[in-house]
Amino acid sequence: METEVAPSLGKGGEFQPHLEIAKDGIQAIFGMRGMNKSTWERKVSAYKRWGLSEEEILVAFGRSPHCITASEDKIMRVMGFFINKMGLEPSLIVKCPGLLTYSLEKRLIPRASVIQVLQSEGLVKKDFYLPTVFGCAEELFLKKFVMPYEKEASELLQLYKRKLNFPE
């Protein structure tokens, strides 16, 4: 189902987007509740700085309304991490906007660090679908990406547990 978000001004001049969303509709309404027009525009602008079009931002919002409720700082830091540090395309957020709900320091960076080590040692393929890595439960991540490689890459568990910064 297609998502349509058309903002307008309601009584008293408050910002009121009109939402037509099948999935996550309630979350979208709660996400927009209390958000004024200038806040919406600043967040859209943050995504645009990374090359996303307004249409792509609205698609992402339709898929996961929480992507627009993230702070501008978080949007900029997560997008910067994906694009500048990992070399991913901004369109990844359109496809998987829920990635913005994860902690950069506690989930995204540590897991990316583990995958980088596995890739550099040739233990996993380079064209890995990262949203799967970031989205799986902690126990499953450890079971699939850390424990099987204990012999070949003994530092993986320590690397992950220390929550190291993603290497430059």
Image (cartoon, rainbow, N blue to C red):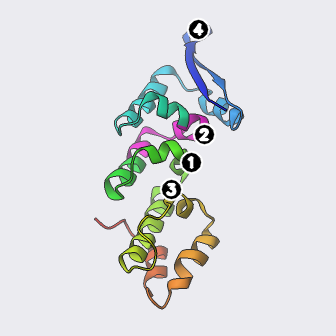
Residue 69: horizontal and vertical position, in percent?
54, 37
Secondary structure of the residue carrying numbered label 1:
helix
What amino acid is labelled 1 in the image? Gly
Which residue corresponds to mark 3? Answer: 103
Callouts 2 and 1 close, C-beta under 8 Å: yes
Would you call the spot at circle 3 few (<14 residues within 10 Å), some (14-19), or many (20 or more)?
Answer: few
Q: Residue 98 carries which label?
A: 1
Direction from residue 142 to residue 23 in the image, left or right: right
Q: Which one is earlier in the sequence, the residue at label 2 or at label 1? A: 2
Query: In the rendered image, which residue does mark 2 sit on?
Result: 63
Give the residue drawn at x 62%, y 27%: 33
Magenta stretch: dominant secondary structure: helix
Q: Are marks 1 and 4 in contact (CB under 8 Å)?
A: no
The answer, for residue 106, to whether it is visible in the render is yes
Residue labelled with disc 4 = 12
What is the CA distance from the residue labelled 1 to the residue labelled 3?
11 Å
